[in-house]
Image (cartoon, grey):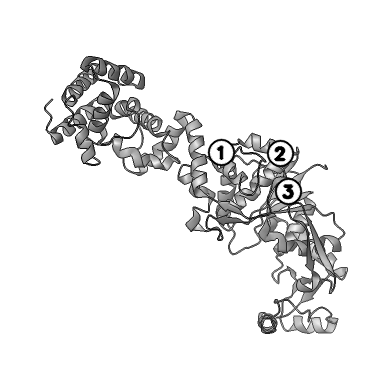
Amino acid sequence: MEKVRVRFAPSPTGPLHIGGARSALFNYLFARRFGGQFIVRVEDTDLERSSRASEADILDALEWLGITWDEGVRVGGPHAPYRQTERLASYQQAAAELVAKGWAYRCYCSEAELEKEREACIAQGLDPRYGGRCRELTPAAEAAFQAAGRRPVIRFKVPDEGNVVVDDLVRGEVAFDCAGIGDFVIVKSDGIPTYNFAVVMDDVSMGITHVIRGEEHLSNTPRQLLIYEALSLPKPRFAHVSLILGKDRSKMSKRHGATAVAQYRSKGYLPEALVNFLALLGWSPGDEEEVFSLAQLSERFSLDRVAKNPAVFDLDKLNWLNGVYIRQAAPERIAELAAPFLVQAGYLQEPLDAGARAKVALIAAAVQEKIEYVAQVTDYAPLFFGEKVAFASEAEKAVLAGEQVPAVLAAFVRQVDRAEELSPAGVKSLLKAVTKETKQKGGRVFMPIRVALTGQQHGPDLQYLIPALGRELVFARVKNAAEQVGIEL
């Protein structure tokens, strides 16, 4: 295979969305799989909507995901510049060449004339397309339009007959009838190139060998192939990956889950989990395995295992997969991610002192096995803050009605009071001492203590909960719970 060069070329008109992130990932994986190069450039010719803020958001999101690039914005390279607005001269030169060769022409039709023509096509049951009224303008006619102040666009002259065949690496051969394409604009009246023209010139100048992008771009490909042929330029191979649908098989939208990568980051999803999930949206490893690191994906990815059928965005599966990665993560990392959520929810205040950081570490360790994304730490936070206990139901009060409970709670308080420090290892020994002192089996000791401390029968491991609460909160909660059920300690 020739030296692979692929690219991701977002339009900076908003944040990086799931579909764009998947396209970037597939290009990255393809380049890494075949020892090629991955380029990131910016298609910023939508002057009204493009912004450097959106560009920064997109690049930051890619970097957060671990999708690095060999050339492009931020990193430079031999094919700079990597923003279209900095490459305008090259597009104008190529457009002039197409006009000179008879493959393109200046069109002076007004918006009103074009709209009238569009309405006429629709009335006849035809797809709207330009009829070519400016195809054969005489120099005198052009001069008259210019004298009237009309500013032309440049249109590509599409052959009247024949097909354009896209040899797609995912979909096979797809044919498009030239008659249905119509002469399309390649340069707008303000001199800015359109997408279909600029993308061809950029891909050629940057030596792109494979164009891997979403299925929504398939209809653009025949126009681009016509430009390649008209300028006798080498064509890349194309691969159009499937659409992403919601779980109900409708077009992906906010109701199916967040659509921007930054939203998942802000909720405490891990980047490696999101990358793993995105890779499985339309690509299959060929076996039942589902958990892959970025390095493993780079070794296994291939276009022949990319499906033609739409991929389904299943938020439940993403949450499951993210939970797998959270459980595998170092507790220190989860603690670092959890702290801002606890601050935002008002449980802690910045700057965090050593005691607060130690408490966050214990909370993170306690909930790490239970959460699917880190923002869920606040669902468990009430268990770790405050002196009063609220019983989940009458069943919890019934647990404290056991005849052994007063002795268990009294022994527990004594052991906590005697302990030099409350640590996970120390709590294990402490609880063992309570069972020995009271001559009770584990469940008859641990459950009353849990209910007294949390008001619940299920929850975080006591070895983390007790140190996180600390001595004073433990005493206050046991006293509060005992008073509620009439136990004297």
Q: Is residue 28 above or below residue 223?
A: above
Camera-near label (3 vs 1) is: 1
Q: Is residue 462 above or below residue 144?
A: above
Nearer the observer, 188 or 322: 322
**Residue 424, located in which quarter of the rendered image?**
top left
The residue located at (81%, 84%) in the rendering is 141
Q: CA distance from mark 2 to mark 1?
A: 17 Å
The residue located at (76%, 51%) in the rendering is 169
Per the image, label 3 sits on a secondary structure element best described as loop
The residue identified by callout 1 is 272
First along the sequence among labels 3 and 1: 3
Q: Residues within 10 Å of mark 3 (few under 14, many from 20)?
A: some
Q: CA distance from mark 2 to mark 3?
A: 22 Å
Per the image, label 2 sits on a secondary structure element best described as helix
Q: Residues within 10 Å of mark 2 (few under 14, many from 20)?
A: some
Q: Quadrant of the C terminus?
A: top left
Per the image, label 1 sits on a secondary structure element best described as helix
Image location (x, y in percent) of residue 205: 79, 52
Q: Amino acid at mark 2?
A: Arg
The disc placed on residue 80 is 3
Q: Amino acid at mark 1?
A: Glu
Nearer the observer, 447 or 422: 447
The answer to whether one can see residue 87 in this image is yes
The residue identified by callout 2 is 32
First along the sequence among labels 2 and 1: 2
Image location (x, y in percent) of residue 189: 70, 72
- Residue 139 placement, left or right of 181: right
- Residue 481 placement, left or right of 202: left
Q: Are marks 2 and 1 in contact (CB under 8 Å)?
A: no
Q: Residues within 10 Å of mark 1 (few under 14, many from 20)?
A: some
Q: CA distance from mark 3 to mark 1?
A: 30 Å
